Image: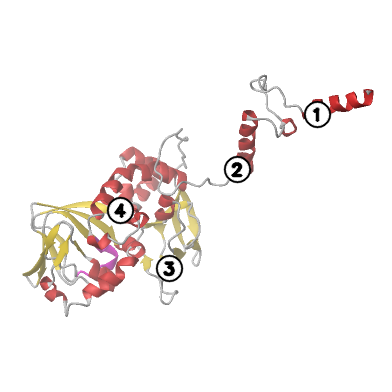
Amino acid sequence: MFTLLKDKCCRFLCCRKPDTTRGTPVGEKRSIKDISPDTETSDDEETKRRIRARNQGRRPSVSSGSLSTKGPVPGKKIVPKSPETVERIKGAVSCNFMLNALATEQLTDVILAMEERKVRAGDTIIKQGDEGDYFYVIDSGEFDVFTRQNDPPTVPVFHYTNGGTFGELALMYNSPRAATVVAVTDGALWALDRDTFRQIVVTANKARSELNQTFLAGMDLMANLTRLEMATIADALQPVTFHKGDVIIAQGDADYASFHFYILIDGTCDFVAAAAVIGSVGAVGYFGEKALTEKSKRAVSVVATSPVVKCLSMDVATFERLMGPFHVIFHRKIHSYAHATDSHNHQRTASRGSSNDLSRV
């Protein structure tokens, strides 16, 4: 009998749950040996702590497209720089519409958080399909951009020669890198970490992007895009305003690196060739893709004719990366004309009205 009672008592003392109402004194750290599988709330917290410790150094995944800023804002990251360096970086990012949209203080915070990266010719900066962790600003050097859709794959889709930026898409959408970027020469980059980029840049551009998405949803051109594809293009479009008489595109311009693709939000424009008006375009029309698709000089001029012309624009580097799904459409329309000056005979009915849309410049 004594032996039986002793065995039952031992089992009771060894297996019973601890008194969780008493807990661990405030400020006292628990060692791993104190952790019991039966412990409830406090043990869950301890397990989370252990996981965080084990994953220290790993960047947590950010939900695709999530722009929430709820929760504590981390301390500002500051990498000391001279005033001259700060001004040089400002000049380097002047072409990036997302950074241009930031308030002065926000832009300063972004620049101060950037880290310098020296690169050698042949270095792969980002690789298509990899996870994104940094946004890059080119300080010096030349870089080639490749995608797996290349034919042949060794031919770059774009070449950076005079500065530029890249790497933002993977950070914005928690998606794999969309292209590979390789250094052609020795150079230097400024790298902005993902967390800072999302906390400042993405959040500041959220309202503008949502407005762009609403507009794009009404375009026939965008009808077959997925929601993510639509959001990606919306984020990449920069608002720009012109006034009556402004030459938006100049016939014969061959500076490919400075080309833009335009979507007209409000107002009207004329297409001019050899001093003659050969067509026009109104809201929901688009233009500028011919030279970008064919990598040729501008075929006609585009001149603002209404008091105010509001457009969304996309630079050539972004066009190369994002507008691949439209190349078949663009080529089909371009080759349907004998030459650019016959384009005014083409009529395109848009979902928000009708316009004589040249779109061949």
Residue 85 vs residue 20, the one in the foreground: 20
Q: Amino acid at mark 1?
A: Cys
Find numbered disc 4 in the image and state the secondary structure of the residue it sits on.
helix
Residue 227: image x %, image y %? Answer: 35, 54
Kindly identify which numbered label has been placed on residue 146: 3
Q: Would you name the residue on which mark 2 appears?
A: 56
Instruction: Give the magenta part as a residue range.
Output: 253-261
Residue found at x 90% / y 26%: 4
Identify whether 135 is placed above or below 5: below
Residue 11: image x %, image y %? Answer: 83, 29
Q: Would you name the residue on which mark 1 appears?
A: 14
Q: Would you name the residue on which mark 4 appears?
A: 234
Say which label, 3 or 1, has the lower sequence index.
1
Say which label, 4 or 1, has the lower sequence index.
1
- Quadrant of residue 259 within the rendered picture: bottom left
Identify whether 174 is placed above or below 107: below
Q: Is 73 on the left or on the right of 12, as rendered?
A: left
